Image: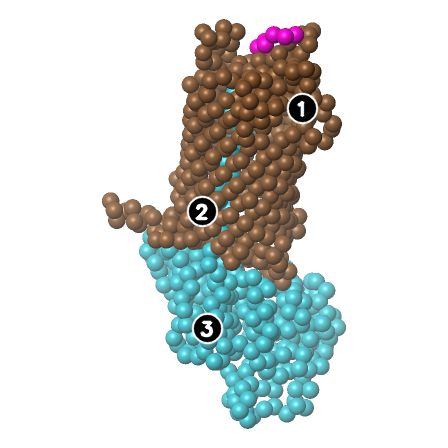
Amino acid sequence: MALHRFRFKAMGCPCALQIYAPSAGDARAWAASARGEIARLERKYSRYRADSLLSRINASAGDPDGVLVDGETASLFDYAATCHAQSAGLFDVTSGILRRAWDFRSGRLPEAAQIEALLPRVGWAKVRWAPPRIALPLEGMELDLGGFVKEYAADRTAALLRASGCRSGVVDLGGDLAVVGPHPDGRPWIVGVRDAAHAERPALSVPLFAGGIATSGDYERAMVVGGVRYGHILDPRTGWPIAGLASVTVLASCCLIAGSASTIALLHGDRARAWLDALGLPHVRQTHAGEIENRIPAPPIQSPAAPPAARHRPAHR
Amino acid sequence: MIRLERQSRAAARRARLRRRQERRLARARRPSAVLHALTSSALALPGLSLRASAESAPTEVRTDYRFSRYAEDKLPGGKVAVGGERGRYDIDIHQFRFETGLSDRIGVAIELAHEAMSGATPWYVTPGPNGGDPVQVMTQATIEERRTDALLSSSYYLERGKASLGAGVSVENDYLAVNGSLGGERQFNEKNTTLSGGVGASVDRITPSDTNQYPTRPKEEDKQSYDVFVGLGQVVGRNTNLQSSLKYQHATGFLSDPYKLAFVAGNPETDERPSQRNQFSWLTRYRHHVSTLDGTLHFDYKLYLDDWNMNSHTFELGWYQTLWDRIRLVPSLRYYSQSQADFYAPFYTAPRSDGLRSSDYRLSPFGAYSWRIEAATRFQTWSFVWDASVAWERYVSDADLAIQSVGVENPGLVSFNLFTVGLTARF
């Protein structure tokens, strides 16, 4: 068993696959099927590809008949609906068009009118989702599954590798990771959590045996206007940035949940800490001031052995 | 050699950490409604298996040691036939358990117990002086006895369940028991439902001591017992678990107590019980975790019935409180009440037509309560995780505590203190 590493670009970010395989041939075959799966999901859900299913749905905006979707897509929309409901409307797959108003490189705030013009076309509640048919009732509405397709792809790829017999490995899609299985000797994968204040330096390392890890950050695209920082985490209800944590990294039973949890946490702004504590998943949060709060708990106490049997079997005489 | 040992210890520690992380990620420490909703929705996605692995054998090595001191209260002078207040039985119990996985699929455990018993026990009951309450005659000499138990068990872990096999032996100078068991467990319904079942058998040989001194004692007797059980566990909501099981046991052979006598028409006679007993019990357990308090409520009820016409009810209520992730406090209360065996009497004015007789307090009608407090803590040193615990239980039995009203109390009813310390190491 040797470790094989593959690096490639997919879904607009650098990706890596590390797998243990009995031979180089097996490793290549597994890597090819993994990349095939990632490419399939990119073709299907990329909003940058005119031929994707998502682009077809977005092109149908305004058509009350909408588009019929397959089971996988239906499950993803159901998941989007769950995230929307569980975040009180903060996580919204229709909010992508708000980015048109915000150009963070310009250093200028958008006109209020620009945002006002976009808001009527934002809101998952306006989407008519009657499985298996989805209809975007207003022209110009758009869905953007960028918030979780990458995490879903990492989980799918890890599951696919497990199903093909791979026992040890990790799928890394731009920093969102799903574990196939720990190293053959049982060691965990060590995942560096990026320091929000010093981009290329890891803030800390997290051992990961199973499940997934994902980070959402508000430190990459931002501008400071009049002494106020405007980040790229936008509130779908107002169209304006939400100020809060710089980055949240969550560990979960799969990468998808880790990703949604970290995204929703950032959308909660200054209530993110309380929301994360209530959620109950291990996580690391970083502030714009460079503070790192590690909420990966110590092992909880377990039940000791059963109580002594003495009282259940008194001496027989 | 040392290197290999260190490597395997490190591997076991990693495996332990992996299992812990898998458990934690699959079921967050304080699972919230949000996480539950996200997880249910994610589970619906095609080909996304959240379960990291099937049921698997323990990958860590776990050793447990506990010492218990069981001390019965002295019997007050008023309940003793001759000689005033008498001390009763004390037992020192050492228990050792070792458990490890031989592979992903197979786990084994060895349990050893050693008990050192000493003191006097109830022998027979006579009518009280001047027509008063009956009084207890205790064994004269101080009994010193030792018992050693050994049990070997193995489990085979499957995708959604496990199969177990066990064999044990219990040795005393006057007693030998050999037992075996087979059991299985299967999970359904996204692991929310667990069905379990099993069978067991025990073959015992009794060779009473001092038969020269007490010629009515049998020299050698046998008994056999067989049992079968089925159980159903169900997760009811995220924080609640309900388990219910039925057990039937059939015993045949010498079921009397060779060391006890019954006072019949003025003469102490041997204890004579039926040569068969059919026992039936129904146990229900309720567990409810209260996330806001990080505590769990345990409530158990057991109904017992047998064809000696005995029945009993046991109610147990406990609260498992975790403090600062490292300390656990468990206060609990138990109430017990039983009816008498139909042939039992504290003493007999005339022999029964069926020849049966026993004045054993354990077959008499009574009730009991006990309270128990346990404190446990966890700490880590080197590559070990230690759990240390200490517990104290106080048990009191009395005829007045029975659900039904009892005419005559058996004077031999026992009350005791049980003190336990335990240490578990995992690596």
Question: Which residue appears at 60% of the width and 48% of the height?
Answer: B319
Q: Which residue lies under the disc numbered 3?
A: A292
Chain ID of residue with mark 2: B
Q: Nearer the viewer, mark 1 or mark 3?
A: 1
Badge 1 crowding class, 10 Å Cα cut-off, few under 14, some 14 to 19, many 20 or more, is some
Determine the image quadrant of residue A29.
bottom left
Q: Nearer the viewer, mark 3 or mark 2?
A: 2
Q: Which residue is mark 2?
A: B388
Real-space Cα distance between discs 1 and 2? 40 Å
> How far across and how far down the image is residue A217, in percent?
51, 75
Q: What residue type is disc 1 on?
A: Glu
Between marks 1 and 2 in the image, the one whose residue lies nearer the viewer:
1
Chain A: its colour in the image is: cyan
Q: Chain of mark 3?
A: A
Q: Residue at x 61, y 57 (%)?
A: B293
Determine whether, in the image, residue B180 is placed left or right of residue B381: right
Does A145 sit left or right of B174 as displayed?
A: right
Q: Are marks 3 and 2 on the same chain?
A: no
Q: Quadrant of residue B35?
A: bottom right
- Furthest residue in direction left, as rendered: B1
Give the percent coordinates (x, y) of residue B31: 59, 58
Q: Secondary structure at mark 3?
A: strand
The chain to which mark 1 is attached is: B
Q: Are marks 1 and 3 on the same chain?
A: no
